[in-house]
Image (spheres, rainbow, N blue to C red):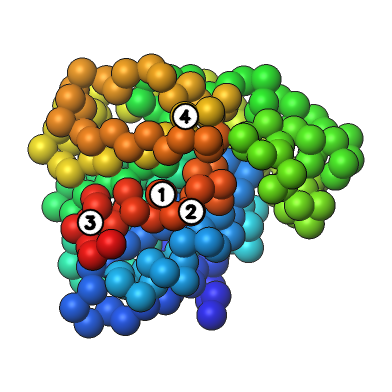
Amino acid sequence: MTRTEVVEGIATAMRHCGAAAGNPPVLGVHGFAADMSVWMLLEPALGTQVSLTLIDLPAHGASAAMVPEGGLSGFAAHLAGVMDISSPSSVWILAHSFGAAVALRAAALRRAQVAGLILIAPAGLGTPVNPDFVAELCAAPDARVTRTILGQMLARPTLVTPAMAEGVFAQVQDPRRGAALRQVADMLPGLDAALAPDLPHLADLPIHVIRGALDPIIAPDNPLPASLAMAKLHMIENAGHLPQLEAPRPTLAAIRAAIGLPQ
């Protein structure tokens, strides 16, 4: 059941599933203009093997319509606060797109609290986010157009349902939440430069990168930064920017392999 916790002064929607005793803690972090529902096809199976906590980032979903002070570092400090609440031991962070950039900065801030990173279609690793997609999403005039724009993320655009599009459109159109999301959108072009100094300090951290081979939002064929040469890359065929929704089985297999869980 989803609950609200105040983290770093921000009302934050959180949900926990899976038995904590003996299972590795995993914290799921979604991307820009999304919410914890991006994990809906992985949550049932993953929750049987890990102690899983999902959140809505500030300005997103059911969390407060505000952006933490400090930009990316503010989001990372917020995520570190979530780690303090979610687990007494070090956690694996499973993060998508913009959420991956937040996870990388949080790991740099709280290295001892992070067991490893599993980054799906990550922003901040030297490959820019498609600016046209972000601009079009923020300017969409109705839910029908929003659905078409969201479909750009996927190898199979029909997977975007009208309800998904209506939810995103409603958030962008809400005066306070829309303004907060546009603040986040303004952060996206600078993520690669912002994170470059952090990456050498994460070289000894287990990092797994999962990419959809057909991703048009963050190009999947660019190499990872040299400072993360030890990171393991998992390529998901026939998937775009959301392999956890488009190809849940191979994505789940890659997550299990990263953590060392039985397949």
Residue nearer the viewer, 119 or 44: 44
Amino acid type of the residue that numbered disc 2 sits on in the rendered structure: Pro
Disc 1 target residue: 251
Give the residue displayed 50% in from the left and 44% down from the top. 243
SS of the residue under disc 4: loop
Decide if residue 260 is in sight here. yes
Q: At x 22% / y 56%, what residue is drawn? A: 259
Helix, strand or loop for disc 2:
helix
> Residues at badges 2 and 1 in contact (C-beta under 8 Å)?
yes
Question: At 23% from the left edge and 41% from the top edge, which residue is drawn?
Answer: 207
Residue position marked by numbered label 3 in the rendering: 259
The C terminus: image quadrant: bottom left
First in sequence: mark 4 vs mark 3: 4
- Crowding at dot 1, Cα within 10 Å, few <14 / some 14-19 / many 20+, comes out as many
Question: Upstream in the sequence, badge 1 or badge 3?
Answer: 1
Residue 35 pos. (x, y %)? 58, 55
Q: Quarter of the image holding residue 222?
A: top left
Q: CA distance from mark 4 to mark 1?
A: 12 Å
